[in-house]
Image: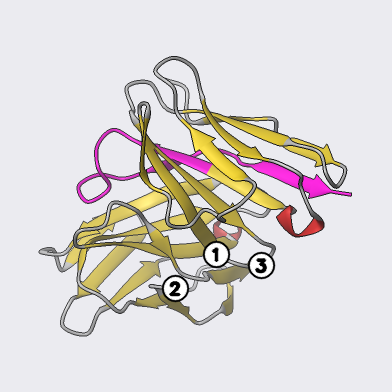
Amino acid sequence: NAGVMQNPRHLVRRRGQEARLRCSPMKGHSHVYWYRQLPEEGLKFMVYLQKENIIDESGMPKERFSAEFPKEGPSILRIQQVVRGDSAAYFCASSGGIVEWTEAFFGQGTRLTVV
Amino acid sequence: SQQGEEDPQALSIQEGENATMNCSYKTSINNLQWYRQNSGRGLVHLILIRSNEREKHSGRLRVTLDTSKKSSSLLITASRAADTASYFCATVSQGAQKLVFGQGTRLTINP
């Protein structure tokens, strides 16, 4: 049973370009979470999705950021018109049920560098 | 918003010693989870402790939870060089369906 898979592992974008980060949850998991981590800091919650639904997007910036988790395929975190401040590690996690009752498993992350 | 706060921020000990890290939080929780992160890597789940539990063990790990003080501790016994990593506590508040992380404790085990 493969773990949470994120790709790419490293992504370099020029200012103004779009970044698309992909996350395939563990088999059987239908709950996906996205987090952002700056160097030497903890993880900041961005968004929680279930299949085809955004449940909690309270941590998402109001502009340029969007997330989806379609019926088929991976979850996508999309950042439009990237700026230098978007440079960070983005982690995806999945769980088999709500995290009130079960643990979440994390991927290896995508490290985004905006030049 | 920050929920968990780890203490200390950094800890350096000799191999073989025990390491204790603490986590304090602010709101009522359903559970608290501890994770380890090696430099430049993803997070590895260590232990989940529910709000009605006081202590859990997993190998060399021991986690306690005191809901009256809103605090938890992670004890690693007989530390090894491979335990060098950052350790994070994450809480799930009642009514919320997300993990909220603290800033982490950076643990260094000296051989």
Question: Are circles 2 and 3 on residues that touch, CB within 8 Å?
Answer: no
Q: Is residue A85 above or below residue B44?
A: below
Q: Which residue is mark 2?
A: B2
Residue A114 included in the magenta stretch of the image: yes
Residue at coordinates 74% horizontally, 45% vertically from top-left? A112
User: x, y (%) of residue A4?
Assistant: 49, 31
Kindly give the residue lying farthest to the front in the view shown: A63
Residue at coordinates 51% horizontally, 23% vertically from top-left? A74
Which is more foreground, mark 2 or mark 3? 2
* Label ID, residue A42: 1
Q: How far is disc 1 from disc 2 in space, using C-alphas?
A: 9 Å
Q: Is residue A96 above or below residue B18?
A: above
Say yes or no: labels 3 and 1 on the same chain: yes
Q: Is residue B60 above or below residue B8?
A: above
Which is more foreground, mark 1 or mark 2? 2
**Occupied quadrant, residue A17:** top right
Q: How far is disc 2 from disc 3 in space, using C-alphas?
A: 15 Å
